[in-house]
Amino acid sequence: MRVSLSLALMLCAGVASAQGRIHPDPAKALPGFKPHQLPFETPQDGVARPEFRSAPFYAVILKTVARCSPVEQERAELQKLFPANKVFAPMFECEQEEAIRYTNVNPKLGFIAVYAGADIEEAEEFLAGVEHMALFPGANLRRMQAVLVYP
């Protein structure tokens, strides 16, 4: 059976563009993710790849911290303020086994953020609620992706 070149390219493009669905509810954690990570569906197909990205999403950066700062206790406390939205913090290249990084952020800094939604309208409404709390001066909205980097 012969596959046309255009069909083969469409199939490859479909595989390349696949992105993992975010699971932003902290009460419904996905296996394999650490408490400080934003979980997303990852491929279970056994195909070797250098990385796999989540679907794009919006997050509110609550605060910036020094890179690799121990923030887990603070992150867990902040999670109580946002029971329906995952609070997360990057630890990429900070712990030996860490494999999740985030796009559209300064890699020289750390942060604590909260999932704000999949679309801009939802995210702006969420940001307005965060600003109304008046607890996070300088909180800002960021469009990003979570990236699983394979060893």
Image: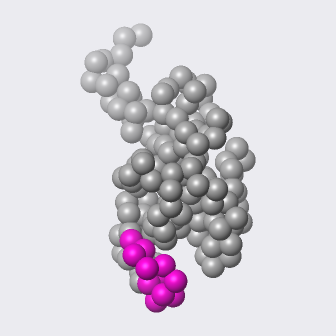
In the displayed structure, would residue 33 be above or below residue 7? below
Q: Could you tell me which residue is drawn at 42 percent across and 74 percent down? A: 139
In the picture, measured across the screen, residue 43 lies left or right of residue 117, that is: right
Residue 68, percent from left and from top: 56, 50
Q: Which scheme is used to colour this image of the protein?
A: one colour
Instruction: Please check the rendered image and state whether residue 136 is part of the magenta-colored stretch, yes or no.
Output: yes
Q: Quadrant of the N terminus?
A: top left
Residue at the left extreme of this rendering: 6
Instruction: Please check the rendered image and state whether residue 55 is part of the magenta-colored stretch, yes or no.
Output: no
Q: Could you tell me which residue is drawn at 45 percent across and 53 percent down? A: 109
In the displayed structure, would residue 118 be above or below residue 68? below
Q: Which residues are magenta?
A: 129-140
Q: Quadrant of the C terminus?
A: top right
Q: For residue 20, say whether it is visible.
A: yes
Residue 24, percent from left and from top: 58, 62
Name the quadrant containing residue 79. Answer: bottom right
Residue at the top extreme of this rendering: 1
In the picture, measured across the screen, residue 102 lies left or right of residue 8, that is: right
Q: Could you tell me which residue is drawn at 47 percent across and 64 percent down? A: 64
Nearer the observer, 75 or 81: 75
Q: For residue 25, say whether it is visible.
A: no
Residue 40, percent from left and from top: 57, 50
In the displayed structure, would residue 31 be above or below residue 150? below
Name the quadrant containing residue 77. Answer: bottom right
Nearer the observer, 41 or 132: 132
Residue 16, percent from left and from top: 40, 33
How many marks the image carries: the answer is 0
